[in-house]
Image (cartoon, coloured by chain):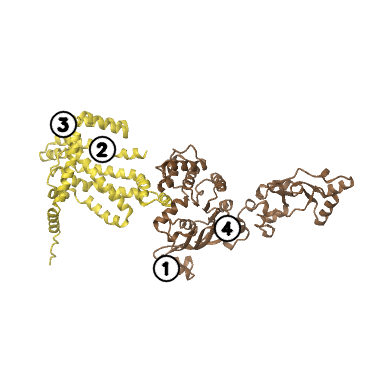
Amino acid sequence: MTLPKIPLGDWVDTFVDFLQVQLEPLFDLIRDGIGGFVEFIVWILSSVPAAILIILFTALMLWVSKWTNAVFTAVGLLLIYNLGYWDGTIDTLALVLTSVVISIIIGVPIGIWISQNDTARNIITPILDFMQTMPAFVYLIPAILFFGIGMVPGIIASVIFAMPPTIRLTNLGIRQVPEDLIEAANAFGSTTKQKLFKVQLPLATPTIMAGVNQSVMLSLSMVVIASLVGAPGLGADVYRAVTQIKVGIGFEAGLAIVILAIVLDRISQNIGMKKQK
Amino acid sequence: MSDAKIEVRNVTKVFGKSPQQGVKMLNEGLSKKQILEKTGMTVGVNKASFEVRSGEIFVIMGLSGSGKSTLVRMFNRLIDPTDGQVLIDGQDIVKMKPNELREVRRSKISMVFQRFALFPHRTVLSNTEYGLEIKGSDRKQQREKALEALKLVGLEGYENSYPSELSGGMQQRVGLARALANDPDVLLMDEAFSALDPLIRKDMQNELLELQEKMEKTIIFITHDLDEALRIGDRIALMKDGSIVQVGTPEEILMNPANDYVERFVEDVDLSKVLTAAHVMKRPEKILADRGLRVALQIMKDAGISSLYIVDKKQKLVGAITAQDAADALKKNQKIEDIMIRDLQTVTPDTLISEMFEQVATASLPVAVIDEEERLKGIIVRGAILAALAGDDIQLNGNEVK
């Protein structure tokens, strides 16, 4: 006797169909909002001449980090420009920035919430595990259904994949604040809010920034996958090179991603430390 | 002079799954150990009852694990008591609602912590301002009060430093300034000086005593160091296994230990650093300066002593004579003034015995004890000091002298 297969896939299909119909206005709103935001960023970045943007990035790096990193930034970005991947880089940058901004806007408050509430933490943590271990490609399917193709479903998939570290490390950073400081804050009659904003969050900032840094890197790792649903950028170039088996182009586009990754990593890593002195 | 500022009544704290059951078992007379064996629950504090008077330094002392830190945290409810009452100015802290409790914490009670617990991301000044900032008081006033508090603890000029840039002693001064800035009535100090090295600790103890003279706060001071307790405590509560074993002045605890535990605890104490001249001095035989030598000799003969102190009408000490000198002078028809020894060894009533060993050892006459108006209060003979150090409390004058 064989047990009948549990129709888990069918259930998910039905559920997604249900959502698609019932929540359509909401999805439209999200799509328009995120789409508008990305276009805005792309518009800003591409209306600034490449040379000025490169100088700005180099200056920012010089401010937050060592001069060697600044030199790397200048040389790396010039190389990208020279190879002809500047527009793709801007699209990718816009995608990553949007994903990270959304991750912070949603992730930090959730992180704060689960740091204050053990029940919430016990519910959210397994969801985060799920979000991070489910192959990222899978998120693309409902994302297409809900948001069509293009940049937006790519961003949604990136956010789902990249947000958990921000949530986890916000929670960790707040919980790691030494017990005696919490006692001191309580002993002087702080309200929960005062304690959070005057003691816990400032002390958790370096840890939260480490989480944001992780989110940046994870969303960068999503750019090729996002190109599968039509997101433009360096990922699309890599994807095209793969389908057409063009090693040279694949390497160039891949190198551009690596350079962008290193620049974003050094900047986001050092901003947190800079703030803490 | 002073009424109870804080009354602690039957305060109990049981840690574990069903604390109320633990309280019940305590009421049925089970011991801390029995409850731990039966239920796995830990009795942190077992029915502590005592009063803290306004303006005194009340030391709660015990070894680690005796429940003293738990007890002090129930004064401002950083830990909620399982049972009992803590009345501050007659108001029961235990029954307060969160907003009332917050009000008390903001204005009435401040706390100083063992490991300083300064906010590392804030400057010294901003740490000191914390309590005022939380209260939402006027910005300018905040700054003024914080600067005043920093001045009080001797940290002028360090306002813009970060705690990590300061030494341990200085960090704890910031902790103290932060607690004082609120101008609370009650100061809770949880092993405040225990993390400091011995010399700094002693300095801080002295400074606390000096500050206390000006401020007259009610201070509850937790320590595991008996010397510290004896040094700064007006009264001491000794804790063991969560229970208060004895409450009393340092002298009472030293001279009349309530039980074997206290006795063992205090047996190594250097009594000479606790007992003062007032404790060991004897009633002096004295004579007015205008009396004759014959009278003086008669007094000495009656009392069986070989020297006599001379005072004026206001009881002010003017000198002394010995029996030998007096007898010789009588033959030569001299007067008291002619043979009087004017250069006398004197101490004040609160001089510690340890500080007068040398004087007592070298003086040919008993050392005179005089008050600030130089009135003769008593004399100190070597035998009395030895007896007192041997722990013979019959030799002590107790508190009546004070």
Chain where mark 2 sits: A
Residue A65 in the image, given as x and y percentages of width and height: 32, 34
Question: Disc 4 on helix, strand or loop?
Answer: helix
Which hue is chain A drawn in? yellow
Task: Report if residue A94 is visible in the image.
Answer: yes
Q: Is residue B378 above or below residue B170?
A: below
Give the spatial CA distance, label 1 vs label 2: 58 Å
Residue A85 in the image, given as x and y percentages of width and height: 16, 33
- The residue type indicated by label 3 comes to Gly
Q: Quadrant of the C terminus of chain B?
A: bottom right
Q: Which residue is mark 4?
A: B265
Give the numbered dot on residue A264.
2
3 and 4 marks in contact (CB < 8 Å) = no
- The residue type indicated by label 2 comes to Leu
Pointer 3 and pointer 4 on the same chain = no
Which hue is chain B drawn in? brown
Q: Is residue B335 left or right of residue B148?
A: right
Q: Which residue is mark 3?
A: A84
Give the spatial CA distance, label 3 vs label 2: 20 Å
Give the spatial CA distance, label 1 vs label 4: 33 Å
Pointer 1 and pointer 2 on the same chain = no
Q: Which residue is mark 1?
A: B21
1 and 4 marks in contact (CB < 8 Å) = no
